[in-house]
Image (cartoon, helix red, strand yellow):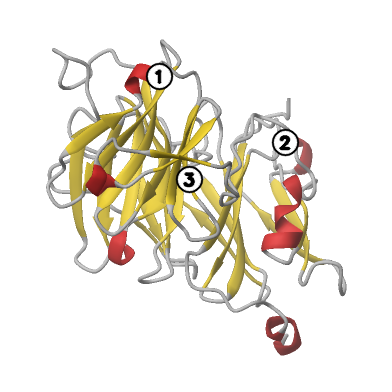
Amino acid sequence: MRILLSVLPAVLCAQQIQNLGPQAQSIDFESSILFNSCRATHWVGFHDSVVGEAPTQLHHVNMSTGRSYTINTAKTGRGNVYGKTISAANGKLYFTTTAPCYFYEYGLNGALRQITASTWARDACGSNLTDKTGQQAAEGPNGTVLIGTGVRGTLFSYDPASDLVTDYGVIDPPTGNPTCIGCYRYVYTLQADASYAYLGMRDARSNRWWLVMLRLSDGQQTACFERDNATNGMVSRRTSDNAVVYQSRTTWYLVNGAQGCTAFPIATPTTAPYYMPGATYFQNSAQGYEATLFKVDLDLSSVPADSSTGAVTTLRYRLPAGWGSWMTSTTALAMVATVRR
């Protein structure tokens, strides 16, 4: 095992995380993620029942050590596809669920903790007018965690060091509707630097996309690109210098919260891997990120667990990619008797 670890690149906690999205059109398997944390390579599969009968369950495999864990949240919120991130401060995984929304800290060692702020309603993600889902997540400054939500489009942050939650409320609410009642908005993409959060917003009713820059110290918001009336948009990072960039229509811009909406068009950059698939069955090597970025081969064909498998889920993997024997991690889940679609 020491030989396997020695050939892996040295990585910082939280610097490489890839949301693989839904790997199967199965009523009980929502998504999985692959990430490095403190030089170990992890895979976590999120299992649940879309119709709400079964609790969200995690199958976690530390592929660097071969250790695996099965965690039952005992809550019926769905383990949504995108709202997950790692804190570089402590190397833990933070994720949300959907309908209802819960916010969790997972220590990568079998230890799971639900986080709820004193100002939130019981079992909610956010204030009393909470959103349905934690839509997007990112690491903020000093190891903090940022969660952008839907369907009102809010933002909150969590500081693992102090165990404090800051709820920034609705992002760029419509005129005359400060709590965004009846809205259908999402924080679709999310990045942050030392002072600002950058939120790629989408109004699903009008399919309008724009950027909001939020100053983390006081919550001051600046909305940009609203006049573009763009039908696409994305905030990301340029790989060459880690700068925050935003795409509106086909044009990329270098953005900086301290400069407001003064943005500079740039050549199409190489950006950090970002993968937002539909409900498509990806059995192996989704876009090749596993082998190139994480140096691991995955076989996800036996991951979906339902009545046809006896609620058994199996991950096959090979680390490093293209070398050695395939390893297997199998676990039985507590799950209702659903049938794969």
Q: Which mark is residue 236?
A: 3
Helix, strand or loop status at disc 3: strand
Q: Nearer the viewer, residue 250 or 180?
A: 250
Helix, strand or loop status at disc 1: helix
Between disc 2 and disc 3, the foreground one is: 3
* First in sequence: mark 2 vs mark 3: 3
Say which residue appears at 45% left-offset and 19% top-offset.
230
Helix, strand or loop status at disc 2: helix
Q: Residues within 10 Å of mark 3 (few under 14, many from 20)?
A: many
Q: Nearer the viewer, residue 141 or 257?
A: 257
The answer for how far apart the CA atoms under marks 2 and 3 are is 40 Å
The answer for how far apart the CA atoms under marks 3 and 1 are is 19 Å
Residue 171: percent from left, percent from top: 25, 31
The answer for how far apart the CA atoms under marks 1 and 2 are is 49 Å
Q: Is residue 8 toward the left or the right of residue 13 in the image?
A: right
Label 1 is placed on what type of residue? Asp
Q: Quadrant of residue 75?
A: top left
Instruction: Let me know if residue 75 appears in the view.
Output: no
